[in-house]
Amino acid sequence: MKILKFGGTSVGSAERIKGLLDIVRPHERQIIVLSAVAGTTNALVEISQAFTEGNNSRAAQLITSLRDRYHGLIAELFSTEEGLQNGKELIDYHFNLIASFSSDLFTPVEEKIILAQGELISTTLFHFHLTELGIRSKLLPALDFMKIDEDNEPKIDFIRDQLNELLLQAADHNLFITQGYICRNAFGDIDNLRRGGSDYTASLIGAAIDAEEIQIWTDIDGMHNNDPRVVSGTRPISNLSFDEAAELAYFGAKILHPQSVFPAQRYNVPVRLLNTMNPQAPGTLINKEGAAKGVVRSIAAKDGITAIRIHSSRMLLAYGFLRRVFEVFERYKTPIDMITTSEVAISLTIDDTKYLVDIERELTDFGSVEIDRNQTIVCVVGDFALDTHGYASRVLDALKHLPVRMISYGGSDYNISVLVDTEHKVEALRSLHNRLF
Ligand code: ADP
Ligand code: ASP
Ligand code: MG
């Protein structure tokens, strides 16, 4: 079985939704994972913000304009009275639900219910569209099988068991449709896999049922060798290893959700990145064998990073110091990305600043603490095994006109990372591109 995930732009209009049938093969067994229609999740985030801020009238305005957009979409999508009626009832059901909230008692639980509506709508619209064309499909409710634990980690055994059960119950179907992004958490409440999470859904499903292949259909012809949004002249990479793709996704290549490579890697399911607007393009194949020897593959950047430096003379010749520092981050469930140390100081980076105030307070027990926000990790991925040479100097040479805050090299065979102030990110990406490719 293949898993095909279509992102927001791939289902961004009635025309695009109809166009999916150029790619989806109704008679092959496939699970189709859909994102919300482009722009929907951003709009739902804004609606939730308005409720959180107590601004019910702004929320109502935003809801009306999103609802109108969907009425336009269904008018174009359906060609029969019955199809249109089904579409209208669907839109009414979901938008009445969204409009039933108010700023009173609006908590993260309500917010996550609102954020889930986009994927619930897009998948049902596609299912109704297929039904109108006489094509059989089965909706698999992600909220019945996609589950995360108290640490927000997916419960892969639960996902496997539930999904296999649902597939068994619908064994007479070939085409299955499910929602990306949404899930239930340890309390059984509606939750999500964070922004861009539909890629993660596809990878988790592929891993859980040992799929033949996971296809991520998006609006570009595969993983490029730099961020095409800020660097011109980037080109697609035909083959990447799981490790390389995981580094790029984790360090900011937006085409893949940061965690989405790990399940596929763990269960060795190949991932293909493909372009809905140009289905013939070869795209990028990510698999075990994908690495290329002795070359720089790609550059990515992750914004929103906070650097923390702890300076302590007690660190000198002491053992157990780093453990105590790391324990602070562990207590606040805050992952660390980059680390560099000297004899008397340690610098590290985090992107989740939810508990920064508490972390800072505890760290001051060890020494002085300096915090720099608005930092960006620029990550160069390639084959930097210990027997290669010259790469670090080329990276640093490309950045010699910029202030570099941290450098990380040697942690793995395929990553050189530097930390720069976000204001220098674009220049860093462009300069590295010119020097390395
Ligand atoms: P989808 O809605 O299909 O999930 P996304 O917007 O999440 O699509 O991801 C695709 C976008 O990722 C591309 O349009 C491109 O601008 C951006 N992107 C950033 N870095 C890269 C990269 N290295 N290679 C390809 N695309 C990238
Ligand atoms: N719709 C969600 C988002 O915009 C999930 C996704 O598109 O992958 O983040
Ligand atoms: Mg995405």
Image (tube, rainbow, N blue to C red):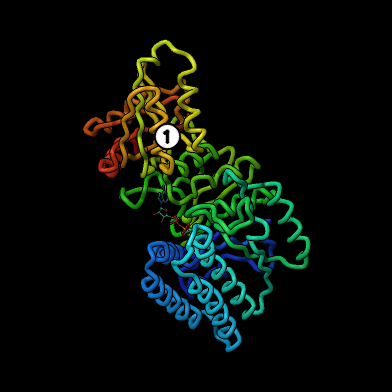
Q: Residue at (37%, 40%) from the top-left corner?
A: 305
Q: Residue at (50%, 67%) from the top-left corner?
A: 11
What is the secondary structure assignment of the residue under circle 1? helix
Q: Is residue 286 above or below residue 139?
A: above
Relative to residue 313, is residue 195 drawn left or right?
right
Of residue 99 and residue 380, the one placed in the foreground of this image is: 99
Q: Residue at (24%, 32%) from the top-left corner?
A: 403
Residue corresponding to mark 1:
359
Q: Is residue 273 above or below residue 177?
A: above
Q: Residue furthest left?
A: 401
Quadrant housing the N terminus: bottom right
Q: Residues within 10 Å of mark 1 (few under 14, many from 20)?
A: some
Q: Residue furthest bottom?
A: 81
Q: Position of residue 59 (x, y in %)?
A: 40, 70
Of residue 234 and residue 332, the one placed in the foreground of this image is: 332
Relative to residue 206, is residue 387 drawn left or right?
left
Q: Position of residue 131 (x, y in %)?
A: 64, 77
Q: Residue at (27%, 29%) from the top-left corner?
A: 397
Q: Position of residue 334 (x, y in %)?
A: 48, 38
